[in-house]
Image (spheres, rainbow, N blue to C red):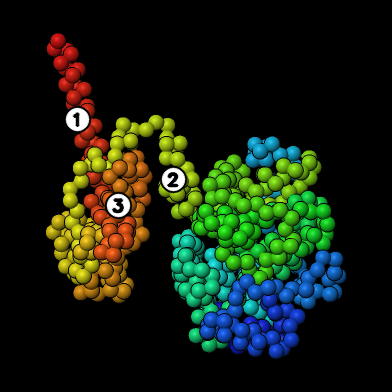
Amino acid sequence: IQKSSSVDAITVTRGHRLRMNRGVEVQDESDRGRGENYESELENREVTADQRKWIRPDLPSRCTWRLGAPLSESPHSHPERTKAPSILPNILWKIGHTPLVRLNKIPKEFGLKCDILAKCEFFNAGGSVKDRIALRMVEDAERPTSGNTGIGLALTAAVKGYRCIITMPEKMSMEKVDVLRALGVEIVRTPTSAAFDTPESHIGTAWGLKNEIPNSHILDQYRNASNPLAHYDTTAEEILEQCDGKLDMLVAGAGTGGTLTGVARKLKERCPNVKIVGVDPEGSILVESKEKNEKKVSFEVEGIGYDFIPTVLDRSLVDMWYKSTDVETFTMSRKLIREEGLLCGGSSGSAVAAAVRMAQQLEEGQRCVVILADSVRNYMSKFLSDEWMCEKGFLSLEAQMDHEPWWWNLTVQSLHLSAPLTVSPSLSCQKTIEILREKAFDQAPVVNESGVILGMVTLGRILSFVSAGKAKPSEAVSNVLCKSFKQVHLTDSLGKLSHILKTDNFAPVVHDHIQYEADGSACQRQVVFGVVTAIDLLNYITTHERLDQSSSECSLSDDVSL
Ligand SMILES: Cc1ncc(COP(=O)(O)O)c(C=O)c1O
């Protein structure tokens, strides 16, 4: 993050210790309490470790906080909370002071005796709990990502006039990317599968950029003490105020762990008997080792779960962990929207799924506060979409329908698709356009000499690449390949196909087979049988319905003539 007009506002000294223009210093969780030599020591360790200049996001925490220590011993500054004026000076004042809302139908359905109170963080200006840390990290740096932190930072950067570059894994929703772009951020997408400690991961890429761009600073939410501090000083204080200091359980998901750590520290200081429940998705290693998560390596819920233990996560504060599954997560998020009217995101479903189970141990009159971290706005094309839910196996197609139409369980094979027109990857865009025009097609699969599908080329995609200057008409189609599309098999049902065609213009029909190589090794291959579009399905349905009708009319007239 870099001030667009003057780069003097934020300066970075080596070893990731930040010095602000007002002379205040912010330290990282991982270097607090160390001497001056520590910076160069750390830097040496980093470079010799893997010849890259970066600081690991999972260094052991050096935080000196301890339960029971007086505030005067705190190594941090704790700004006073101020009452907002009637007219807010800018939108950053709309961060914090989120409502605490009682859940009604869901606790009843799960037979709970206690109250479940939802801290609705989606009412923050940028739509998530992360607005709090973004503002605090920048303000602490003036005086120093992923997904939602990005939106909070982008909002803060837009209002304060910083240039902001955000690195984020491909997994993060397009809704988040679009909001970030609208806020003027430069975005670099990174492979979701890249391990956190590789140069290709979102963390590695951010360090690469920081090392390249002069006067830039990396906020590093994984190590930045301002992350848990934002929650210690605001989120937890608000909860205590809203509950008159009386609560028995707190449930929160853990991503960086900043929310859980910051809130838990303050609550444990003020309500010694409070139980802290951390929520970690299956496949993440925040609570269990990689080996224990072996069965499942990826998960769909965004914002919680990692493949390393972030420095700011203080696991000693957590009394109970809950491992959430994607299916219960998204089922509960939909329930929160449908039954409680709370327009929350996916990880809120994980937290409430945990709360309704863990709060079984609470009695009538006791209180469980659960953090709803973000808004459904980020997931309109994901868990809010029935198509997405079905495609991922979180909702059954049939469950949604009153009755299935006659063609629903017939297979794609029934469509008798004609052999596809395919193009080779070296064909030029210009020639491809001519062929598609002549054959009246909008798209074609691009296949190599062995018939293996490399991707799809569509007229729309060529147009967008050529018009944006990203490809020339003379370039090979391999440069404009579309790789994200859904495929169907000949054995898939027309019901499944109809769902895909509600959102996609086409679907290649593929066949999987095993190919043995010269060295005897076997590999999975896919060949393309055809491309199916809405017109193929509609033609089939209407033609057969007509045939059906005329044959029944025919038998009726036969009956009459008899
Ligand atoms: C949707 C969502 N839920 C939960 C969290 C967890 O927050 P933390 O990083 O404080 O653990 C995040 C963090 O990005 C988030 O985006």
Q: Dividing the picture into quarters, in which one does residue 375 lie?
A: bottom right
Q: CA distance from mark 1 to mark 2?
A: 32 Å
- Left or right? Give the position of 540 relative to 17: left
The answer to whether the beta carbon of the residue marked 2 is less than 8 Å from any atom of ligand 1 is no
- Looking at the rendering, in which quadrant would you find the C terminus? top left
Q: Residue at x 63, y 68 (%)?
A: 310
Whole-percent x, y for residue 97 in the image: 70, 60
Residue at mark 1: 547
Earlier residue among tags 1 and 2: 2
- Left or right? Give the position of 535 relative to 300: left
The answer to whether the beta carbon of the residue marked 1 is less than 8 Å from any atom of ligand 1 is no
Residue at mark 3: 512
Label 2 SS: helix
- Can the viewer see residue 468 in this picture? yes
Query: Which labelled disc corresponds to residue 390?
Result: 2
Mark 3, residues whose alpha carbon is within 10 Å: few (<14), some, or many (≥20)? Answer: few
Q: Residue at x 61, y 43 (%)?
A: 340
The amino acid beneath tag 2 is Cys
